[in-house]
Image (cartoon, grey):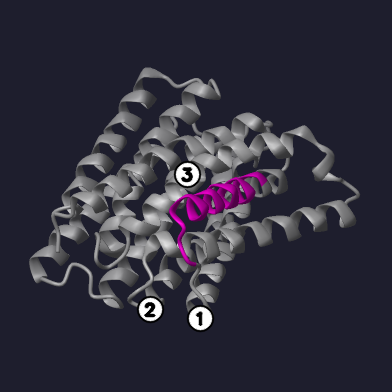
Amino acid sequence: MNIVGLLFAALAIIGWSAYPTLVSVFGGKPVQGIFGATWGTLIVAIVLVLVNGMSIPGGSDFWLSFASGAAWAFGNVLTIVAFGMKDADGNVLGSAKAMPISTAFQITANVLWGVIMLGNWSTPTSKIYGGIAVIVILLGAYLTTYQEKKTAGNKELLIKAVGLLLIAQIGYSLYGILPQYTSNGVDGLHMFLPQAIGMATFGLLLGIYETVKNHNNIFKQATTYKQIFSGFFFAMAALGYLVSAQPEMLGLATGFVLSQVSIVGATVSGIVVMRIFKTKKEWAVISLGLVAIVISASVTAFLK
């Protein structure tokens, strides 16, 4: 077990627990959420480099990191759009429902890539236990979306959200996969700034497009800059994940699965902060799903 890797994974859990709820609390359009998140991340990355006097990777290492950051921004803007989707009765999907669905897709894609392409969980025993853990996590994520009284509008909304989040998964997959192919000497800390530049570039271009195309100058709106605060939490999570997922730390499969324990904080905070009413039965089923996620993710920390 790599203790340093686990500590960085804990940063990812804390940051990604708070980030989705903060995005929903600050509100605004999805483009404002993505601009705030990406530029908040860039600010943290620049400070980190200046304080530690780190060099910036060049060549293909820079561009792989840059592309992974831009890919994340693409996936995240679609996820934020999913947060605000409404059914026929005007009920918002919200982060509490969207995040478990997104998490299920991300875990499946990243674990399969880590195991098949990168050789994570190399022993048969690790693959068996890891596979069981992932299945239980997916079931747990499904339980967190439980609703006692389902409506036709709610089902239709979930179907639309699943389609959108599947497209978003392309960006999230590239975000996790591309950094695995940088040079051996480039660690997660050194990749962080190029990755943040990729994120911020996408966020800036999206903001300019919104301003020119829709005549909505987000750069003059206070909400845009409030969202930068949510970006600080994302930056903490992104850095924690980027380091923990490195081969010499926990590897992609374990690092990613552990980071997704953040679904617990994101789900609970999304329900509580956004004041979403839940029946006792709904809370019981959701709690069961969250416990299943935590226990199963913990198992992967011991796999090699």
Q: Outermost residue toward the left?
A: 125
Q: Residue at x 32, y 60 (%)?
A: 245
Q: Between residue 24 and residue 233, name the one nearer to us.
A: 233
Question: Up-down: is 221 above or below 284?
Answer: below
Mark closer to the chain start, 2 or 3: 3
Q: Which of marks 2 and 3 is in front?
A: 2
Judging by the rendered image, the residue that carries numbered circle 2 is: 183
Sequence-first disc among 1 and 2: 1
* Visible residue check, residue 276: no
Q: Is residue 62 found inside the magenta-colored segment of the image?
A: no
Rendered image quadrant of residue 225: top right
Q: Are marks 1 and 2 in contact (CB under 8 Å)?
A: yes
In the shown orientation, is residue 218 left or right of residue 54?
Answer: right
Pointer 1 residue: 60
Q: Which residue lies furthest to the bottom in this view?
A: 59
Which residue is drawn at the image coordinates 47% and 35% (left, top)? 18
The spot of residue 96 in percent (x, y) is 48, 35
Q: Quadrant of the N terminus?
A: bottom left
Residue at figure coordinates x 45%, y 61% from the top left: 54
Quarter of the image where one finds residue 194: bottom right
Give the secondary structure at mark 3: helix
Q: Which of marks 3 and 1 is nearer the N terminus?
A: 1
Residue type at mark 1: give it: Ser
Give the Cα separation between the discs numbered 1 and 2.
Answer: 9 Å
103 left or right of 88?
left
On the rendered structure, is 9 left or right of 71?
left
Question: Mark 3 — residue?
Answer: 99
Q: State which region is magenta.
A: 36-55
Q: Nearer the viewer, residue 181 or 149?
A: 181
Q: Residue at x 75, y 60 (%)?
A: 205
What distance separates the C-alpha of mark 3 from that of mark 1?
A: 32 Å
